[in-house]
Amino acid sequence: MIRRWSRELRALLIVGGLAVAAVAIVRFVEGQPGAARHHSRAPDTVIPGTGETPIRPRPLPDGRLEVEHIQGISVIPAAPRRIASLGWNDELLAVGVRPCAAAGSGARGFEPHLADRLEGVPLVDVTAGGPDLEALAATAPDLIIAVWYWQTRYDHLAAIAPTVVLQPSHWFWRARFQDVATLAGRAAAGRERLAALDARIAESRDRIHARIGDASVAMLRIFAREYRLYGHGYSGPLLYGDLALRRPTLVQQLAWDRDVVRLSLEGLIRLDADHILLMHEQRVPISASEMRRLLDHPVWQQLPAVRAGRVYPVPDLLMRGGVISREVVLDRLDRILGGLE
Amino acid sequence: MLGLALVALGVALFALFVGATERAPGAIVDALWGGADPETRLVVQHVRMPRALAAALVGGALGGAGAIMQVITRNPLAGPGIMGLNGGSALAVLGIMIAFPYAGLPTLALGSLGGSAVAAGLVTLVARALGAALTPLGLTLCGAAIAAFFGAIAGAIVIAVNMQNDMLYWTVGGLGTLDWGAVGFLAAGVLPAGALAVHLTPALTILLLGDETAVGLGQPIRRVRLLGIAVVVMSAGLATAVAGPVAFVGLMAPHASRALFGHDQRWTVPGAALVGAAAVQVADIIGRVASAPGEIPLGVFLGLVGAPLLVWLVGRRDMAKLT
């Protein structure tokens, strides 16, 4: 009897231990720097090339530049001629630099909105767990600019050419854009391009506000069997920050402090947006059938924006960073919300 | 058993009263009979009811299938996946996605079911051709071989055609968006499979005594195994096809049931189905309440609910009695 009780007691202790461990592990992981891989408005880091902190190249006596970044300090040419872009295609093209190699998908090529401009540039497949190092080395770059996803390959990359790793940021994308321009030796061109984009944003903001007034706009994405509502994620800062569109209550309550929240079907009922920008993966056919299923569902049918006919399918372009893609997104928003159709 | 059934029913009913949005309990009861305000009616009739039923069916199917699988292969670590079901299903789904890119859920689910059936059939054929016949060890080893083989082909296709995104779509499981159509689809397969399973349970109990004894007692052991496999394919295959891969229930529920009911399969198999139904229901409730009105995938909490439950049940009984 006593043995039995002690066994039950031990089982209970293990169960309790498991529960405590589960909570502790999740809490611990949440607090790690990698958990905020992308962005966040208030990074507690001052590492150059992350958050809002720009890189600050220092000239060396031999004419080269010393750059501190996430992975350490690199010595790079002051005027690089052959830049390999691992994740910064849009930014480089925007300041008029054609990379000597650019990241893309082996099967699907470059991002559709950049494919024309990258024609003839050797593609480095990054879909097989990291950049294809052989293809990259074959292009003999004198500078590699990489996104932070591939920091585990840093030693390999640095063996090919001096490498600077920058952390993408949805919120501080301007700082990152300027970093890329600076590294490419085109800092002035970068500033000009940003000024032009800001003027363009102001134009769109006036146009859209004149048309929809104070109406709220939600950015919703159907991903597999999930409904994802965006706050700071992806084009959120453009929509709610630069264009100053009103956030629906649900976005304000749930998503604003985060990149994205997954909504349940029931949670969707409270989506009080006047306008919905509906994203879905165009390149994944199965999402089309999932989307049809959602659009037929009574929960969807009763949403205010749906009843008012204010749902606009937008390509997954709203997901991308960069200046050129923002211009494409602005064109699209001008047509959808600004009445330029 | 009655108690367990009441628990499963209780959590299913409880599932109607909790969700992403707060509703008055009285309004929910009214909504069941067509009363209450339109929004509550919508939530109860079109969101919570199909979801609760789907959770019960998926959990029941996986729990029951796991119990049958553990008897047939006499392997306490067997789950519904051990017959190569998941590999076959993934391969079939890939094939359909390539041939009919715009296929909807029913086509994909049927295809996935077909793939599971082909895999299970292949396992039994190979086991027989090797002379291992349908012995527990023969089935387990051939199952592992076929599963790895199908998995490798599927992996090769995914890379060759670059369909990682599509497969991700398929494998992100969950009950979140299942509507009445999906529930009807599930029920049409799972309920007949359940009836067949109940019919098989006396024979399964005898199978546990060992093949020689079972034959001596006049059991057509090969037929029992084949029918058992058919039940597993129909129930677990369909559950996976509709809800995506739901881990752990098929392994955990049978052991929990055995800890409660012992080795008489007339009790253990239905018991495992009820434990599975209750566990999936509880995990799903936690998943949608924990970050409401957001959603946390089912699999996250199944482990959190299931692992401690299993540890506690194991702690309550002599380990020797569990196997």
Image: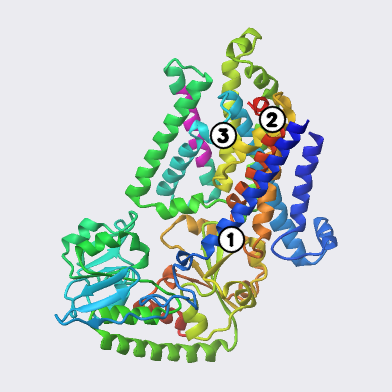
Q: Position of residue A154 (x, y in %)?
A: 29, 62
Q: Position of residue B84 (x, y in %)?
A: 48, 33
- Which of discs 3 and 1 lies nearer the camera? The answer is 3
Classified by dominant secondary structure, the portion drawn in magenta counts as helix
Dot 3: chain letter: B
Q: Position of residue A197 (x, y in %)?
A: 37, 87
User: Which class describes the residues within 10 Å of circle 1: few (<14), some (14-19), or many (20+)?
Assistant: many
**Residue at label 3?**
B79
Residue A100 falls in image quadrant: bottom left
Dot 2: chain letter: B
Residue at point 62%, 10% (across, down): B213
> Do we see residue B129 in this rendering?
yes
Give the CA distance from mark 3 to mark 2. 15 Å
Q: Nearer the viewer, residue A182 or A308?
A: A182
Q: Nearer the viewer, residue A146 or B58?
A: A146
Going by the picture, which residue comes out furthest to the top?
A: B216
Amino acid carrying label 3: it is Gly
Mark sitting on residue B258: 2
**Residue at label 1?**
A294
Residue at point 67%, 67% (across, down): A269
Residue at point 35%, 43% (across, down): B156
Residue A94 falls in image quadrant: bottom left
Q: Position of residue B106 (x, y in %)?
A: 56, 46
* Figure coloring: rainbow
Q: Which span is picked out in magenta?
A: B111-125
Q: Is residue B51 left or right of residue A108?
A: right
Amino acid carrying label 1: it is Leu
